[in-house]
């Protein structure tokens, strides 16, 4: 009986891991190699630009970088990334609340009189995928 339960458990675990994919994000167009870049992955409209589902901070080499989110469930996501030039761990803003450090989103989403929307930044991941984000 124990062997059967163990086999069933392994089978269920293998099915669950088959539902997960890897998402590779390449970021380019950075103006220098100073500081680091934070790449935030969001999985809903309600959390976009507020609470990341997963995030990776990476060093910059040759004004670009590549990060991979491993083992994420298939689904809908949005990405926001910023260049933390002074390495203080946050996106700096001026007195009016406008970012003073460079940032970009998936699908080149941009906001009008405010931040970009999840609707404009979202994309679907159904298999191992790669996307590119270019800072302008």
Image: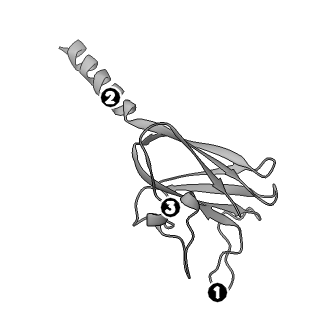
Local secondary structure at mark 3: helix
Quadrant position of the C terminus in the picture: bottom right
- Percent coordinates x, y for residue 58 in the rendering: 68, 49
Task: Name which residue lies at 24% across and 21% down.
Answer: 8
Alpha carbon distance from label 2 to label 1: 49 Å
Which residue is labeled 3 in the image? Answer: 121
Q: Point out the tag, 1 or 3, that comes first from the N-terminus.
A: 1
- Percent coordinates x, y for residue 123 in the rendering: 46, 53
Local secondary structure at mark 1: loop
Q: Is residue 20 above or below residue 41?
A: above
Q: Are marks 1 and 3 in contact (CB under 8 Å)?
A: no
Residue 70 in sight? no
Q: Are marks 3 and 2 in contact (CB under 8 Å)?
A: no
Q: Point out the tag, 2 or 1, that comes first from the N-terminus.
A: 2
Residue 36 in sight? yes
Label of residue 8 in the image: none
Q: Is residue 127 above or below residue 54?
A: above
State the residue in front, 54 or 124. Answer: 124
Task: Name which residue lies at 41% across and 41% down.
Answer: 126
Q: Residue furthest left?
A: 1
Alpha carbon distance from label 1 to label 3: 24 Å
Picture colour scheme: one colour
State the residue in front, 86 or 70. Answer: 70
Local secondary structure at mark 2: helix
- Percent coordinates x, y for residue 76 in the rendering: 41, 52
Which residue is labeled 2 in the image? Answer: 15
- Percent coordinates x, y for residue 32 in the rendering: 82, 58
Which residue is labeled 1 in the image? Answer: 96
Corner quadrant of residue 16 = top left
């Amino acid at each position: 009986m124990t062997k059967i339960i163990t086999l069933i458990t392994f089978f269920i675990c293998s099915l669950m891991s088959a539902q997960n994919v890897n998402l590779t994000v390449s970021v380019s167009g950075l103006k220098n190699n100073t500081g680091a870049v934070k790449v935030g992955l969001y999985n809903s409209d309600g959390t976009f630009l507020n609470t990341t589902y997963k995030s990776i901070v990476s060093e910059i080499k040759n004004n670009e970088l590549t990060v991979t989110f491993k083992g994420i469930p298939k689904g809908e996501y949005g990405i926001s990334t910023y260049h933390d030039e002074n390495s203080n761990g946050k996106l700096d803003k001026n007195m009016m609340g406008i970012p003073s450090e460079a940032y970009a989103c998936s699908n080149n989403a941009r906001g009008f009189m405010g931040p970009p929307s999840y609707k404009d930044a979202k994309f679907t991941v159904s298999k191992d995928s790669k996307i590119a984000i270019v800072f302008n």
